[in-house]
């Protein structure tokens, strides 16, 4: 039996990844605040299980409760492979340094960085104890590698997730897990809507992002998830710890 625990599968890229893993006979556990009715129906269609665990990843106490609950559902007799897709993410606060809201910064770091670290920590321990192989995919961003005016918090958490990914790969060498980060390019999701609604004062590149939408340069979540599925199809070719960039994969 294969499972995928996907954070942020209620919409956007996470939803598309969940849908496409179901097609590959993977049972899905979705972690987010809201559920997704369409995924429930997809699960029936593909004869896999689908379960939603409601969790606000910005709340440390909810993560504490989530960890044993999700582990119990995934690691049991009959499980031979587990994917962990750390996908849930927020872009806000979009604001220049000096104007950042303290609470928003703390929530952001909790969702984008602390939650993936704690989920991975729990899963790797159990997988190694029970000799279950894992595929750990951390969704990152090109912002990890360049300074973006107004995105200091987002760039920082995505840069940190890249370093977390390669450190994990270094420590887990020889364990048989597949570990990488996926940088998906610009996707037509709610997150891009939030980006476009920023003020130019808070985010200097806002006009460029509005233009990308107008030019139809944003990819659909389904296309971006499909490129990830192609990568997963050849696990032996995957270099653990690497950041795979969509733009390189489609060249
Ligand atoms: N869109 C892009 O252009 C783009 C580019 C590069 C990287 N990425 C990355 O791709 C990933 C997915 O982004 P997306 O564009 O699909 O974003 P999205 O459409 O805004 O979806 C975000 C997902 O994260 C979940 N989430 C947000 N806050 C949460 C919280 N407090 N607790 C639990 N779950 C929470 C949401 O679920 P609920 O609201 O139901 O909780 C939702 O499922 C993110 O890591 C993002 O940084 C996106």
Image (cartoon, grey):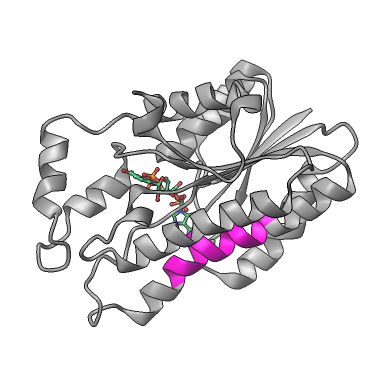
Count of numbered circles on the image:
0
In the rendered image, residue 67, in percent from the top left (x then y), is placed at 71, 59
Quarter of the figure with residue 174: top right
Residue in the image at 28% along x and 77% along y: 100
> Left or right: where does residue 202 sit relative to residue 90?
left
Quarter of the rendering occupied by the N terminus: top right
Q: Residue 46: give x, y in percent of width and height.
A: 62, 17
Which residue: 54% across, 61% down?
57
Instruction: State left or right for residue 12 relative to residue 81.
Output: left
Which residue occupies the foreground of this view, 22 or 135? 135
Residue drawn where x is 10% and y is 40% of the image: 211
**Magenta residues (range):** 107-120
Is residue 40 at least partly visible in the picture?
A: yes
User: Is the magenta region chiefly helix, strand or loop?
Assistant: helix
Residue 71: x, y in percent?
77, 50
Asked if 217 appears above or below 191 in the picture, the reply is: above
Q: Note whether 143 is above or below 135 in the view shown.
A: below
Relative to residue 9, is residue 179 drawn left or right? right
Between 155 and 18, the one nearer to me in the picture: 155
Where, quadrant-wise, is the C terminus in this rendering?
A: top left
Q: Is residue 30 visible?
A: no
């Amino acid at each position: 039996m294969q499972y995928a625990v996907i954070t942020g599968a209620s919409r956007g890229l996470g939803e598309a990844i969940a849908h496409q893993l179901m097609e590959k006979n993977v049972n899905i556990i979705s972690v987010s605040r809201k559920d997704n009715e369409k995924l429930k129906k997809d699960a029936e269609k593909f004869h896999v299980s689908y379960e939603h665990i409601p969790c606000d990843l910005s709340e440390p106490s909810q993560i504490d409760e989530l960890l044993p609950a999700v582990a119990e559902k995934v690691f049991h007799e009959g499980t031979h492979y587990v994917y962990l897709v750390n996908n849930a993410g927020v872009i806000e606060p979009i604001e220049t340094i000096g104007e950042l809201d303290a609470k928003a910064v703390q929530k952001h770091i909790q969702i984008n960085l602390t939650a993936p670290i704690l989920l991975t920590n729990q899963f790797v321990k159990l997988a190694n104890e029970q000799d279950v192989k894992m595929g750990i995919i951390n969704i990152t961003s090109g912002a990890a590698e360049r300074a973006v005016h107004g995105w200091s918090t987002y760039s920082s958490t995505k840069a940190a997730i890249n370093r977390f990914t390669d450190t994990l790969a270094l420590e887990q060498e020889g364990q048989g897990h597949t570990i990488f980060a996926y940088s998906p390019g610009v996707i037509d999701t709610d997150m891009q809507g939030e980006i476009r609604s920023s003020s130019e004062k808070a985010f200097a590149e806002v006009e460029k992002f509005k233009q990308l939408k107008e030019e139809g340069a944003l990819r659909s979540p389904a296309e971006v998830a499909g490129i990830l599925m192609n990568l997963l199809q050849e696990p032996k070719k995957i270099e653990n710890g690497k950041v795979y960039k969509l733009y390189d994969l489609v060249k």
